[in-house]
Image (cartoon, grey):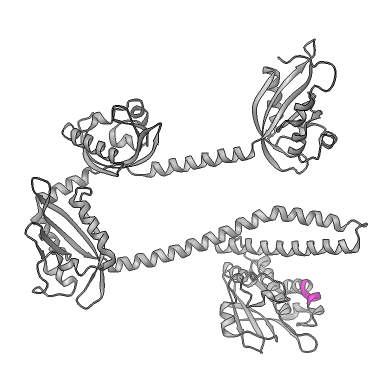
Amino acid sequence: MAQPPSSGADNFGTLFAFLPIGAYRSTPNGRQLRANPALARLNGFADEAEQLASVRDIGDTWYVQPGRRTEFEALLARDGQVIAFESEVFRYKTRERIWVSENAHLVRDAAGQVLYYEGTVEEITQRVRDREALRRSQEQLSQVVDLVPGMVYRSVRQPDGHFWPSFVSHGVLPLYGLTPEQVLSDGRALLRLRHPDDQARVALETRQAADRGAVRQSRFRLRLHSGQVKWVQVISAPAPPEDGQSVRVGVVFDITERQHAEDALRENSELWKRALESSGDGVWDWQIAAGVEQLSPACKALYGYEQDELPATPGTLDDRTHPDDVPAMLQAREDHFAGRTPRYVNEHRVRCKDGHWKWVLSRGIVIERDAQSRPLRMIGTHTDITARRQADELRIARDRAEAADLAKSQFLSRVSHELRTPLNAIMGFSQLLALDGALPDKQRGWVQQVLNASHHLLGLMDDILDLSAAQTGELPVALSQFELAPLLAEVADLLGASAQQAGIALLPQPLGEAVPAGTCIQADRKRLKQVLVNLVSNAIKYQHRSGAGAWVRVSLTQDDTHWVLAVADNGPGLTEAQCARLFRPFERLGAQGGPVPGTGLGLALCRQLCEAMGGQIGVESRLGEGATFSVRLPRG
């Protein structure tokens, strides 16, 4: 328990003033008595005096989470102190949300009555964010690991040379019949389940791979407690050492069915060969020791050759393999010969008789070895996969394009959201400055420039958000029947002054007379107004002339299935190439350096809005003859 304060100066002194973290003294009812410079800075104040003048009740306005102050006081009352009390709080002056860690204790008088609280406050915002990011990363990694078929593991080499697991995924249960907890509590639990006939070989492979720091691929049998025998394949690789000991990470797959199938295949190679010949795939039979490779008629026909063409030599097809594909093909073959893979599988291109390249899937297996395990005979197939490879390439290109487009939309949306908060603050403070009657005219002009730029940027962000939402299908559209004339009148009210200032006639006058009274249309009223305002505004801005004869006209026609709202002008017009680029986001046709402000998003957004309402937008124009933008909407 803390001792009562001594008499004399403030009891804080130099240490209090120069502490790099915040320190304070406050009464039990929340009134602050002292705050060191670090605490004042943490709360956005210039010094202690400003903080004490601004903060009346530390507990009432500081904590983000309701009731957090009550928890703090309860701990103090119970223990007399609080250690590492983490909370989300507001910086008093800016109301920015941050995370802090508090340490505090009670100071009592001689009678045991609480005089005040004393404590320290350290900002830990980045630590909390890092901790949360680590938690999310670990959670995501755990999810990925659990999706991997089989068991994922990490093991550490012990002084006796054996590797003991330090992590195993939940896949160990269906594979070995053991829980992760059982495996981690008994380092030899998995070793005891290896088939006795495979123990020595697997131990040697493990030790050799660890000594060389090499990737290991091995297959062996398990004999479970139930008596069941399984075949598994292990693939492991070295990882950074731990406390000077070797570490390996890997995966274990259940290959029982595949092993049985390969065993049966080896036992019935001739039957398999005949069956494959009847399937239409090309079959090859390579007698490695004799230097002979026989190709079935179907295999020769695959490349456009007759049955009596092509010599029966191993290099016949190798010499016709695309040079870029040869290294991978030879490596895949060597991996199978060396027993690193259970079978040979490779995709490569082969030049046909007519000179064109054909993609094939080549698969094979060694069916005979000598006493030193060197391959003697290998049989396999060639399958034409040209169409599949072409389809895969198209799919990959499409997926990349779609992913890039989605990433772009998500990026724009997130950036717009992030910019809105500081922008609102800029606009708010600028508006307050503009209301200051004592502000000099020159500075008032600067403030107005800030406001104008802020409004422009806010409009840009709104367009970006709408465009991103439309492209991702998240833009809300509510279709309804409404009268069109009042909507056109609203457009005229919004843009009439701009047209008049530019010396451009907005026809007809009034604009509501562009449609017969009582004409109703089915659309989203808000979005249709947004489209029309954009089109009419563009027609006014890009007219490039004023005075007698300059006009922008709105009209309505219909056909059997659609209403057609047209916005036409007699401005400079567009070329065919410009029309083709007009609806692309950020496309301003070279006007970005000119006097007319804009972002290049308006027409792209108009197209998305029209399509979201089940309609279309198009443009007809010739250079020097003006332009007509047509919005087609289904008739209800």
Question: How many marks overall?
Answer: 0
Q: Quadrant of residue 290?
A: bottom left
620, 416: nearer the viewer: 416
Is 414 on the left or on the right of 512, as rendered?
A: left
Q: Position of residue 432 (x, y in %)?
A: 84, 54
Image: magenta residue range = 494-498
Q: Position of residue 164 (x, y in %)?
A: 33, 30
Q: Position of residue 217 (x, y in %)?
A: 26, 44
Is 344 above or below relative to 308? Answer: above
Question: Please, which residue is most extreme toward the left here?
Answer: 290
Is 315 above or below relative to 161? Answer: below
Main SS type for the magenta part?
A: helix
Q: Is residue 165 in view?
A: yes
In reply to whether residue 495 is colored magenta, the answer given is yes
Seen at 76% across and 44% down, the residue is 94
Q: Is residue 515 in view?
A: no
Q: Position of residue 553 (x, y in %)?
A: 72, 82
Seen at 20% across and 54% down, the residue is 334
Quarter occupied by the C terminus = bottom right
Quarter occupied by the N terminus = top right
In reply to whether residue 13 is colored magenta, the answer given is no
Is 438 on the left or on the right of 109, as rendered?
A: right
127, 567: nearer the viewer: 127
415, 350: nearer the viewer: 350
Q: Quadrant of residue 430?
A: bottom right
